[in-house]
Image (cartoon, rainbow, N blue to C red):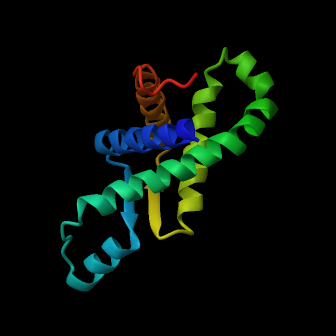
Amino acid sequence: MRSFIVRVLINGLALWIASWILPGLDITTSATTEAVAKTGVSQGTDAAGIVLAYLFIGLIFGLVNAFVRPIVSFLSLPITILTLGLFTIVINAAMLYLTSWISSYTPVDFTIDSFFWTAVLAAIIITIVSLVADRIPGARHR
């Protein structure tokens, strides 16, 4: 259970860094969208709501990676072998798009602009952040 919570925290951190670097990634809540629609001005939302939104999307992303990604990776094994493993970046980008689609049915909306390279670059950034965070001594599970 502890490693699952740590994984959700790492996913949330990785998504935050990716959305900070790439302008095409955005996480909004329905409360933020309603406030902007009423006033026409983006009001500063509270930090706790933003953190919870990133953790919620990190949870969805973790569940997608736990249940869907192994099936997709297995089915795409021949093309992954032919590309010497580079196709896994495309699989990671597809998991981001799936997370974005699932989040559209929740109060927290994770959007990726229509440009495919944004998802690919986000997948690379999330992979690097996850690898670095896994190397932290307290985050490694035994």
Q: Residue at x 74, y 38 (%)?
A: 72
Residue 58 place in picture, x, y as percent:
48, 48
Whether 104 is drawn above or below 89: the answer is below
Residue 88 place in picture, x, y as percent:
63, 27
Q: In the displayed orientation, state which residue is furthest to the top.
A: 84
How many discs mark residues in the rendered view?
0
Q: Is residue 140 left or right of residue 69?
A: left
Q: Is residue 13 left or right of residue 65?
A: left
Quadrant in which the C terminus is drawn: top right
Q: Quadrant of residue 48?
A: bottom left
Residue 78 place in picture, x, y as percent:
80, 23
Give the camera-side residue of 18 and 114. Answer: 18
- Residue 112 appears in the rendering: no
Whether 112 is drawn above or below 137: the answer is below
Give the camera-side residue of 142 and 113. Answer: 142
Q: Quadrant of residue 13?
A: top left
Whether 122 is drawn above or below 38: the answer is above
Quadrant in which the N terminus is drawn: top right
Q: Residue at x 53, y 55 (%)?
A: 100
Residue 109 place in picture, x, y as percent:
45, 63
Q: Is residue 49 left or right of residue 113?
A: left
Give the camera-side residue of 5 and 38. Answer: 5
Q: In the displayed orientation, state which residue is furthest to the bottom.
A: 38
Q: Residue at x 53, y 39 (%)?
A: 2
